[in-house]
Amino acid sequence: MTKAPRWPPRAVDHGLSVTSQLVVVGTRSSPLSLVQTGDVVSKLRARFPDRQFTLSRISTTGDTNKDAPLLTMEKGMFVKEIELALLSGEIDLAVHSAKDLTVELPDGLTLAAVSQREDPRDVLVDRWDLALDALPVGARIGTSSPRRTALLMASRRDIRVLPIRGNVGTRLDKAHGDDYDGVVLAAAGLSRLGRLAEVSEYLPPDDFTPEVGQGALAIQTRSDDGDTIETVREVDHGPSHVALAAERAFLRAMGGGCSVPVAAYAELQMDGLTVSAMAALPDGSRVFRAAFDGDARVPETVGQMAAQRLLETGAEEIIDST
């Protein structure tokens, strides 16, 4: 069983104080969403003890349509209703899993801050506590992610990859039930819920390129709400924000809603920013990979160039054919 340490650095303390007022924070009501939002709010409360932060739990399309396959639902299904509440003034800011955001944010909204990214890797949890390459032939592994499905099939064509729905706790329970032998999830979610002890293997990013934004929390505000923007920037983690900007630029350059699995993972290095990218056919029969090193001061450009480099490897052929 492969274990690993938690993920990287700390944000800088700027020491700003502001006047007292009520701040309403929008969030999904799933256990993981509440933990994630609670983490951000606790940091804000520590920075601004004179402000009152209160949570508004909002049901999204993705939460209410629990039985619908994720592939049949539109991108943004876990954020749309929260964004509408933000635009209407019902809430002042929203905390999202960054990977749930659409490539283009609605007019009037901005990604004002990104909290420190947790471990972005995927993890395998299975009934035998085995690594992926040691699973028995025919093992039934659950995921509803097209990216994970393709990469699992590329790694092990002799296992069965099955769709699965539910929150993290539900999926972990199903991994030991009658219909599944295991499940692939995000390490960050298990970390935030205190369930890393159940991990059988951390899947290496070189093989399992993380979803754009995986492990990062995006703090969204209205574009014209300068006071709230200034407030949430106090908990912004610069390296995580730079990485997310590069990854989202990659996705935008790839067409955003293209139907083949694509992913990118950005890492800040001592001498710049590296974006590793991949595209695959849904069945994993072809996987294309590329990487681009660039200037961290222009993360969007680095992300765009990573997309161009990936397309040049032959990925453009499979994207144009779907």
Image: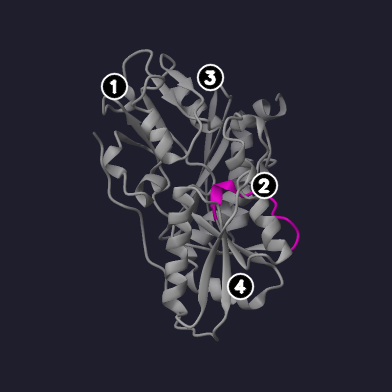
Earlier along the polypeptide chain: callout 3 or callout 2? 2
Residue located beneath label 4 in the image: 229
Amino acid type assigned to the residue bearing label 1 in the image: Ala
Q: Residue at x 48, y 59 (%)?
A: 37
Q: CA distance from mark 4 to mark 1?
A: 48 Å
Earlier along the polypeptide chain: callout 1 or callout 2? 1
Amino acid type assigned to the residue bearing label 3 in the image: Ser
Question: With respect to residue 316, does 189 lie above or below?
Answer: below
Q: Residue at x 29, y 21 (%)?
A: 134
Q: Quadrant of residue 124?
A: top left
Which is closer to the viewer, label 1 or label 3?
Answer: 1
Find residue 39 and report its horizontal and vertical position in percent.
42, 62
Residue located beneath label 1 in the image: 134
Q: Quadrant of residue 298?
A: bottom right
Region of the chain picked out in magenta, as a range: 96-108
Which is closer to the viewer, label 3 or label 4?
Answer: 4
Which is closer to the viewer, label 4 or label 1?
Answer: 4
Q: Residue at x 55, y 20 (%)?
A: 283
Q: Which mark is residue 29?
A: none
Earlier along the polypeptide chain: callout 1 or callout 3? 1
Element at badge 4? helix
